[in-house]
Image (cartoon, rainbow, N blue to C red):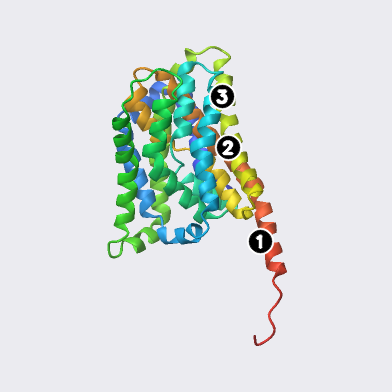
Amino acid sequence: MRPFLARHWFLLVLCGGVVLTCAWPEAVRPAVAWLPPRGVVAVALFLMAWGLDSRRLFLAVVRPGPALWAVAVSYLALPLLALGVGHFLPADLALGLLLIASVPCTLASAQLWTRLAGGNEAVALLVVLLTTSLSWLATTWWLTTAAPVPTATPSAALMSSLFVVLIGPVGAGQLARLLPGMPELAVRYRKPLSIVAQLFVLSIILKATVDVPACVSSLSALAVPATLLACAGTHLAALALGLWGGRALRFAHADCVAVAFACSQKSLPVALSLFQVFYHDSYPLAVVPLAVYHVGQLVLDTFIAEQMTPKCQSLQNAKCQAIPPSEPGA
């Protein structure tokens, strides 16, 4: 029981918090109303980036194929899937689905789920940094040229917002590692820092979820299950494309696992920050796909990662058995 709780504590807290928020939104609202999304996102990204050892990127940079494939799925295939599925949703919900599909990969959970499934964490880390670095351009392009609703979002304002929310905190976190003693401090307190960052992310999820019950009450009976299916289907399609496409390109299994999670998992804090600044007043229902997609990816990927783990372990054991034993004294 204890190993299960240690491994899935965040998912359990997340599900409990979401259920509590949906059941009694007015009780939770005062606790999260004061949270500034951009400030919370900046702090969470700084803490995560501070704990990232960028030297591990060398393992993935020397073979960039898997990471580049993940970026292509994340910023090309997944938004296109969201646009296609969005035709069957109301306009606000279609906008929300495109918004969550066009933001960068999550900074923490993609690595965590890759680790749980026995994948290559270095590839996941490289995908995180590439999608984060390119978000100011890719996310802006999708939201200003392909939005399913008429918006007057200025490209310059969107780019600057993404730069402040993403590039600044991640760059500051990596620069902090250059100070004497800071890398060692990040390693020593890696677990507490990770927990604090996850709790910041949880607070943003609850802030997004607190408005969902009121929004859902204004939707038709078919719109709610359609949104659930659209978010889950889009995520799973991107995950399958990353995994099976990687296999077709003959990437190592561990690299394919990393690609699958990193290309399909999207950052709710970044999406919610953009929603609050640019879309909240005109398209309030767009928050529903943001919360549904993020919660869905965490729940679905937990079970997918557990199914992948035995295969990764068997492949590793097969590799070890294939290595001939060394001669005594060699």
Looking at the rendered structure, the kind of residue marked 2 is Ala
The CA span between labels 3 and 2 is 13 Å
Looking at the rendered structure, the kind of residue marked 1 is Gln
Number of dots carrying numbers: 3
**Which of the numbered marks, if any, corresponds to residue 238?**
2
Residue name at image x 70 percent, y 77 percent: 325
Q: Is residue 201 visible?
A: yes
Rendering coords of residue 330 (x, y %): 64, 85
Rendering coords of residue 58 (x, y %): 46, 61
**Which of the numbered marks, if any, corresponds to residue 316?**
1
Residue underneath mark 3 = 85
Rendering coords of residue 165 (x, y %): 32, 39
Is 168 left or right of 294, judged from the image as shown?
Answer: left
Which of the pair 63/108 is nearer the observer? 63
Q: In the current view of this chain or complex, which residue is farthest to the bottom?
A: 329
Q: Are marks 2 and 1 in contact (CB under 8 Å)?
A: no
Could you tell me which secondary element the residue under label 3 belongs to?
Answer: helix
Looking at the rendered structure, the kind of residue marked 3 is Val
Crowding near the residue tagged with mark 3, few <14, some 14–19, many ≥20 C-alpha atoms within 10 Å: many
Residue name at image x 54 percent, y 40 percent: 73
- Viewer-side label of 1, 3: 3
Q: Is residue 165 above or below residue 111?
A: above
Q: Is residue 5 visible?
A: no
The CA span between labels 1 and 3 is 38 Å
Residue name at image x 46 percent, y 42 percent: 105
Crowding near the residue tagged with mark 1, few <14, some 14–19, many ≥20 C-alpha atoms within 10 Å: some
**Which of the numbered marks, if any, corresponds to residue 160?**
none
If you read the primary sequence from the N terminus, does the residue marked by circle 1 or circle 3 appear first? Answer: 3
Residue name at image x 65 percent, y 55 percent: 312
